Image (cartoon, rainbow, N blue to C red):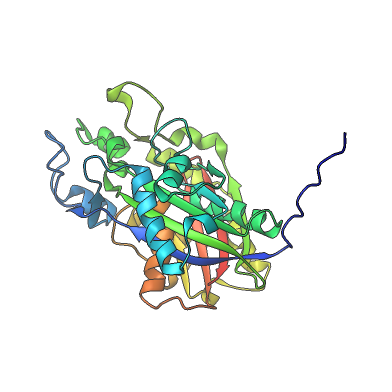
Amino acid sequence: MGVAAQPEPYPRRYAHVAGVAVHLPEESLTTAEPATHDSGTRIHRGVMEQASGVEWRHVAASGQTAAGLAAAAARTLLEQTGHVPPVIELIIYAGVSGDAVEPATAHMVAAELGASCPVFDVRNACNGVLNAIELADTLIAAGRYRTVLIVGGEVATPATRRQVESGADFATAGPSCAVSESGTAMLLEASAVPGVLGHRFCAGSAHWDAAVLPVTRSASASYQVVDPAGLVVGVQELDRSVLRAPLDERGLDWDDMAAICVHQASLPSLHTFCEAAGIPLGKVTIAEHGDLVASTIPAQLHQAVQSGRVQRGDLVALVGVANGVSAGTVLLRW
């Protein structure tokens, strides 16, 4: 029996980011005020704003899902770029939040969009989107796909612990109280001109237990627990030279960037991280929506583009640091 001929792969191409979009839930709360739906909260007014520097949080409405938020952002993006779902050849869901252990949340997003392409999830805490860009770039460069849609939805409030009994409790629960909910989407396309110029990552997995959101059926243990000191040590021990590597390989410096998007859990931690990594704060895009988890960096990129800070042809660095711990940089020419 003869072997069926295999289709020829697409010619090798570069990847570029065709667009980015954000969907924010309508309901918002100031970080200074306790959430009204969290009865009995013991985190007093103003404490989280002072500790985090975060002013606003968006809260998903009852019934809004991570897939729904991601699909809303994707619809906006596809409309802006003039694409329709049949053109999309691969969907990667890269959010921390998911709507089921299985199937992949990407299936739910694809169903909402009416897409019938291959899909899968990528999860690496707040670095999921950067890893998805690395994957999409590699797959496009290899000729496997021509259009890759990266989406994420974050419904993080259920993982927030608000009833704390002591200062020690606040230290472990506090970081999760600045989270904000959102949907984001990025579209990568094959191009004759490089758009994704490089990416490098590192990990310090010995510190995985410094911040954990467990898989459990116990409501009393379903919130995120953070060891701030352990997390700081883990980040400090990372090879920070990796963050500059995509720039160094092209003879570039941070000052050559039109904008630098850095994962923002809180303003104090952002400032500390940038100082240690030598990233100039004047180049950093500051989002006002709280910790958007894995959506933070695409939301910052969207803000920089919408404000006119980033124009087509400009250089942009996406710098991630995430629980686990891991860090990395993706270098783009917008």
Q: Nearer the viewer, residue 62 or 261?
A: 62
Location of residue 245 in the rendering, given as x and y in whole percent from the top left corner: 64, 62
Q: Nearer the viewer, residue 294 or 44?
A: 294
Q: How many marks?
A: 0
Question: Residue visible at 24% across and 52% down?
Answer: 57
Question: Residue visible at 37% across and 68% down?
Answer: 303
Location of residue 298 in the rendering, given as x and y in whole percent from the top left corner: 43, 59
Location of residue 158 in the rendering, given as x and y in whole percent from the top left corner: 28, 36
Question: Residue visible at 57% across and 53% down?
Answer: 89
Question: Residue visible at 22% across and 53% down?
Answer: 49
Location of residue 31 in the rendering, given as x and y in whole percent from the top left corner: 20, 52
Q: Nearer the viewer, residue 153 or 309?
A: 153
On the question of residue 147 being in view, the answer is: yes
Q: Farthest top residue?
A: 218
Q: Is residue 270 above or below residue 233?
A: below
Q: Is residue 303 above or below residue 110?
A: below
Quadrant that contains the N terminus: top right
On the question of residue 50 being in view, the answer is: no
Q: Quadrant of residue 212?
A: top left
Q: Farthest right residue?
A: 1
